[in-house]
Amino acid sequence: MKPNHAELAELVGRPLGSLGDVLLAARELRARGIGAVLVSLGAGGALLVDRSGEHHARTPPITVLSTVGAGDSTLAGFLAAGGEGPDALRHAVAYGAAACRLPGSATPGPADIRTDDVELAPTPDVTLALTGDAA
């Protein structure tokens, strides 16, 4: 499943102020039988919890022109890259960021995707504070 930060908070019934809170909530969903939980975190990137492990990725700060379609683009990137593991997460974040760099509801094309810009953390930083923005 691919909730954003706010949707995940609503699913678990509590605020999620840090990456650690999001990680715990994603683990709860996995314990309920969800195979993979990909959480988009706006400027905080995305968190993936699946059978390959727990992964966090984000880009350096970007100029956001629009968030319309960013969540859909994130999911498209994840699925296009195989739908599992850190490489799929890298693509998910690159696609979501590409959508945010475009005006209105423009859809990113191959030239817009910058996977090299995505920073994949070896371990999610559970102390990272998150804002309420989401895609």
Image: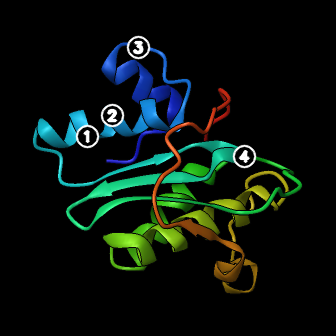
- Please name the residue shown 33% across and 78% down the image: 82
Q: Which of labels 2 and 4 is toward the front? A: 2
Q: CA distance from mark 4 to mark 3?
A: 24 Å
Give the residue number, with chain letter if any, for mark 3.
14
Q: From the top left corner, tell me how far across and down residue 116 is, in percent.
A: 68, 82
Give the residue number, with chain letter if any, for mark 2.
24
Q: Does 113 appear above or below 13?
A: below
Query: In which quarter of the view is residue 106 placed?
Result: bottom right
Amino acid marked by disc 3: Arg
Amino acid marked by disc 2: Leu
Earlier residue among tags 4 and 3? 3
What is the secondary structure assignment of the residue under circle 3? Answer: loop
Give the residue number, with chain letter if any, for mark 1.
27
Q: Which of labels 3 and 2 is toward the front? A: 2
Q: Are marks 3 and 2 in contact (CB under 8 Å)?
A: no
User: How many residues crowd mark 3 within 10 Å: few (<14), some (14–19), many (20+)?
Assistant: few
Q: Are marks 4 and 3 in contact (CB under 8 Å)?
A: no
Q: Are marks 1 and 2 in contact (CB under 8 Å)?
A: yes
What is the secondary structure assignment of the residue under circle 1? Answer: helix
- Please name the residue shown 84% across and 51% down the image: 64
Drawn side of residue 71 relative to residue 131, left or right: left
Give the residue number, with chain letter if any, for mark 4.
67
